[in-house]
Image: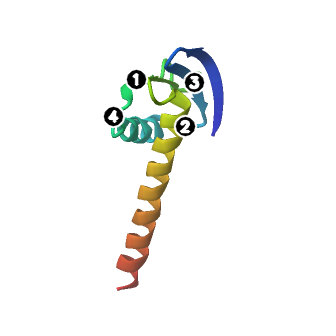
Amino acid sequence: MELELVEKGEGSLLIKVRGEDHTFCNLLRKSLYDDKHVIAASYVIEHPLTEPPKFYVKTKKGKTPERVLTDAAGRVAGQLRELQKQLQRGLKK
């Protein structure tokens, strides 16, 4: 995965997420909406073969878009670790 800053505004951020698709972007978008400081979180893939997803985040005052993205990524990582543990336990039976 590679991130590219496209545009930064006051309380907003637009980035390209190279090497990812709907699966990751939906997971991240869902996690962002768990943060009360997030006003909007969306993405678009203009063409799946030629363009990476563009991800947009807008926040309320009190938390930067960079911070809410970092927090959301941490929540996603935690969920995946928990899934891994459950799979390991479940598959040992």
User: Please, what secondary structure does the residue beneath circle 3 have?
Assistant: strand
- The residue pinned by badge 1 equals 60
Circles 2 and 4: CB atoms closer than 8 Å: no
Looking at the rendered structure, the kind of residue marked 1 is Lys
Number of other residues with Cα within 10 Å of mark 2, as a class: few under 14, some 14 to 19, many 20 or more: some
Taking depth in this image into account, of 93 and 83 the one nearest to the observer is 83
- What is the CA distance from the residue labelled 2 to the residue labelled 3? 12 Å
Number of other residues with Cα within 10 Å of mark 1, as a class: few under 14, some 14 to 19, many 20 or more: some
Circles 4 and 1: CB atoms closer than 8 Å: yes
Q: Earlier in the sequence, mark 2 or mark 3?
A: 3
- The residue pinned by badge 2 equals 20
Q: Residue at x 54, y 20 (%)?
A: 14
- The residue pinned by badge 4 equals 36
Q: Quadrant of residue 38?
A: top left
Q: Residue at x 41, y 65 (%)?
A: 82
- What is the CA distance from the residue labelled 3 to the residue labelled 4? 21 Å
User: Please, what secondary structure does the residue beneath circle 2 have?
Assistant: loop
- What is the CA distance from the residue labelled 1 to the residue labelled 3? 18 Å
